[in-house]
Each structure stands twice: as structure tokens, then as C-alpha cells.
Image: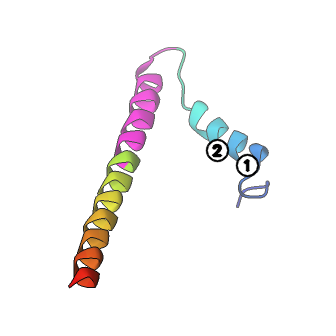
């Protein structure tokens, strides 16, 4: 369990700290994986929300058609 309240800057600092602890001065591949993982997460969330927006758009069009009949 986190020691800080969810949503606070301290909470997120602790989360980021856990990830940054994996950075290795001897290798570098963990740092690369962190950056690539961050970008992958952004892409995944963007795709999810884009799909959701498209679903709302389709529903909106169906409702508008149904109400104009």
C-alpha cells in the first residue's frame, strides 16, 4: 500500500521512483525499456480513447437518425 494519498504529487513521485529505481548505470537497456514502455502506454491509452470516441460518435449518429424518423 502506498504511503501517500492517491492523486497527490507525493503519490506519483513514489510511483515514478519505483520505476526509476530500475535504471541501471551499467547497462542502459532498462532505461530504454522505461522510455519505450511509457510511449507504448501513451499510444495504448490514446487508441483506447480514440476507439471510445468513435463508439460515442456512432451512437450519437444512430440516436439522431432514430429521433428524426
Residue, x 47% and y 24% (percent of image)?
31
Classify mark 2: residues with Cα within 10 Å, few (<14), some (14-19) or many (20+).
Answer: few
Q: Position of residue 60 (x, y in %)?
A: 31, 70
Determine whether, in the image, residue 9 is placed left or right of residue 28.
right
Q: Which residues are magenta?
A: 26-44
Q: Position of residue 22 (x, y in %)?
A: 54, 31
**Is 8 above or below relative to 37?**
below
Q: How many marks?
A: 2
Q: Quadrant of residue 6?
A: bottom right
- Residue hosting label 1: 11
Under circle 1, the secondary element is helix
Residue, x 79% and y 54% (percent of image)?
4
- Residue hosting label 2: 15
The quadrant in which the N terminus is found is bottom right
**Is 50 above or below relative to 37?**
below
Name of the residue lying farthest toward the front = 68
Under circle 2, the secondary element is helix
**Is 6 above or below relative to 32?**
below
Determine whether, in the image, residue 29 is placed left or right of residue 7.
left
Majority secondary structure in the magenta region: helix
13 and 49: which one is in front? 49
Q: Which mark is residue 21?
A: none
Q: Are marks 1 and 2 in contact (CB under 8 Å)?
A: yes
Residue, x 32% and y 49% (percent of image)?
47
Separation of marks 1 and 2 at Cα, in angstroms:
6 Å
Q: Position of residue 11 (x, y in %)?
A: 73, 49
Name of the residue lying farthest toward the top = 26
Residue, x 57% and y 37% (percent of image)?
19
44 and 36: which one is in front? 44
Amino acid at each position: 500500500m502506498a504511503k501517500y494519498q492517491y492523486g497527490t504529487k507525493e503519490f506519483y513521485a513514489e510511483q515514478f521512483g519505483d520505476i526509476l529505481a530500475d535504471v541501471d548505470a551499467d547497462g542502459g537497456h532498462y532505461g530504454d525499456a522505461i522510455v519505450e514502455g511509457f510511449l507504448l502506454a501513451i499510444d495504448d491509452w490514446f487508441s483506447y480513447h480514440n476507439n471510445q470516441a468513435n463508439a460515442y460518435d456512432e451512437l450519437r449518429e444512430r440516436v439522431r437518425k432514430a429521433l428524426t424518423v
